[in-house]
Image: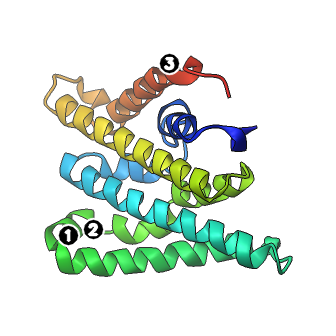
């Protein structure tokens, strides 16, 4: 069972073996939309790390200490979305005050973290895998770290490809999709790293 794994295997599974972007194909909108610049990708990746870890932790606690005892498990989707939206608003206020350049670089993508399906997926999967609190935190760090790694690698590749002699029919979105598919195939090589 997944809930009996040690934290290191949970982290590796979430970070590399079952990467949220390149293996599970969740949150591709921000992956393609924001990955044209390394600095914006780093900002988005760090914002996702913060929001995902915080929202998964709070959602786990709300689920186990409020929803389950009151037999309100059916409200978990609405509760998790409310938790995520609140944390994103909090993060947006902090980034706007402390890092206005990053705030401008993230543009519309910062409020879109609220609807980033990877964040909601991590909260759901932590519950579905029946992780305890520590395992859930490790899992959300692994998922968000894998998101950050994938978007940074992709942004770096897109910056290199933008200066490469790509045929005009492949420039822009087509070469981005080809690059992403090759990255996905590369990450698929981690599938045999260990057996879950």
Which quadrant of the structure image shows residue 123? bottom right
Which x, y percent locates residue 36? Answer: 25, 46
Which quadrant of the structure image shows residue 43? bottom left
Q: Which mark is residue 167?
A: none
Say whether marks 1 and 3 touch (CB < 8 Å).
Answer: no
Question: In 3D space, how far apart are the residues under numbered discs 1 and 2 (Cα atoms)?
Answer: 5 Å
Q: Nearer the viewer, residue 168 or 192?
A: 192
Say whether marks 1 and 2 touch (CB < 8 Å).
Answer: yes
Q: Earlier in the sequence, mark 3 or mark 2?
A: 2
Question: In 3D space, how far apart are the residues under numbered discs 1 and 3 (Cα atoms)?
Answer: 37 Å
Say whether marks 3 and 2 touch (CB < 8 Å).
Answer: no
Q: Earlier in the sequence, mark 1 or mark 3?
A: 1
Q: Which residue is mark 1?
A: 104
Q: Which quadrant: the C terminus? A: top right
Q: Secondary structure at mark 1?
A: helix
Q: Which mark is residue 107?
A: 2
Q: Which quadrant: the N terminus? A: top right
Q: Looking at the image, is 98 positioned above or below residue 150?
A: below
């Amino acid at each position: 069972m997944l809930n009996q794994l040690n934290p290191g295997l949970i982290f590796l599974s979430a970070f590399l073996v079952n990467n949220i972007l390149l293996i599970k194909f969740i949150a591709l909108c921000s992956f393609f939309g924001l990955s044209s610049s390394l600095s914006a990708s780093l900002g988005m990746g760090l914002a996702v790390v913060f929001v995902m870890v915080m929202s998964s932790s709070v959602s786990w606690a709300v689920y186990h200490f409020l929803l389950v005892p009151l037999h309100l498990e059916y409200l978990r989707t609405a509760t998790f979305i409310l938790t995520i939206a609140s944390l994103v608003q909090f993060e947006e206020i902090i980034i706007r005050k402390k890092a206005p350049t990053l705030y401008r670089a993230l543009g519309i993508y910062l409020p879109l973290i609220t609807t980033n399906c990877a964040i909601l997926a991590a909260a759901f999967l932590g519950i579905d895998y029946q992780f305890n609190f520590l395992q859930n935190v490790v899992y959300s760090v692994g998922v968000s770290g894998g998101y950050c790694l994938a978007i940074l690698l992709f942004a770096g590749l897109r910056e290199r490809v933008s200066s490469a002699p790509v045929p005009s029919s492949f420039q822009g979105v087509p070469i981005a999709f080809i690059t992403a598919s090759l990255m996905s195939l590369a990450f698929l090589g981690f599938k045999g790293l260990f057996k879950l």
